[in-house]
Image: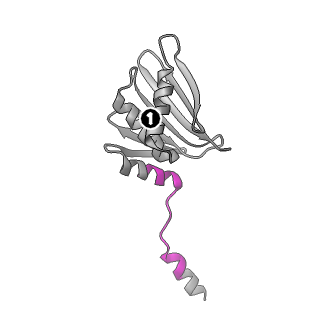
Amino acid sequence: MALGLLAALAATPARADRCDDIANQLKNGIDGLSIGKTAAGVVYLSHPQAKALTLGCAAKNYANQLYARTDRKPKPAYLDLVAGAAAIIFTLPKDSMLTGVKRCMGKLNLFRADASSRYRRLDMRCTRNKTESTITISRGTDQ
């Protein structure tokens, strides 16, 4: 009996962490995306359209988080990349996520360097300084 139970447990494949699963889905779903190191619950990703791209795994305040940084004036390809990644991470339609990303980045202007909004139960925060623009998309643990 014990030998049969041991054999059954040994036959089941090892299950990867949920965050690693999402990172692999991103890699398979977005051309040119590569997975880097994982440290402290953050998976570092890279893509030619973004200067920095990270996937934050479940933490105390949020379920998942996407962070992306690019040049001061984001290109449409960058917005498409962020929307596609957010669509995979949060299982929402890509066109809907593109609307939310454009809305958040559109709130930034000459006088406003920081904008926060809620879109489809997601928290979106966009910032801009003299050289770069960033967006952080997260879903709280209570949602």
Amino acid at circle 1: Leu
Residue drawn at 49 percent across, 59 percent down: 16
Residue at 44% in and 23% down: 133
Say above or below: 77 vs 143. above
Please check the rendered image and state whether residue 137 is part of the magenta-colored stretch, yes or no.
no
Q: In the orientation shown, which residue stands out farthest toward the top?
A: 111
The image shows residue 109 at horizontal and vertical percentages of 48, 15
Identify the residue at horizontal 43%, vertical 45% (top origin). Answer: 37
Q: Could one spot residue 51 in this view of the protein?
A: no
User: What is the magenta range?
Assistant: 7-24
**Residue 63 at what x, y percent from top left?**
60, 45
> What kind of secondary structure does the magenta stretch mostly adopt?
helix
Nearest the viewer among 68 and 4 is 68
Q: Is residue 104 above or below residue 96?
A: above
* Whether residue 22 can be seen here: yes
Few, some or many C-alpha atoms within 10 Å of disc 1 (few <14, some 14-19, many ≥20)? many
Q: Quadrant of the N terminus?
A: bottom right
User: Looking at this rendering, what residue extends furthest in the right direction?
Assistant: 142
Specify whether residue 8 is painted magenta: yes
Model colouring: one colour
Q: Is mark 1 on a helix, strand or loop?
A: helix
For the C terminus, the image quarter is: top right
The residue tagged 1 is 98
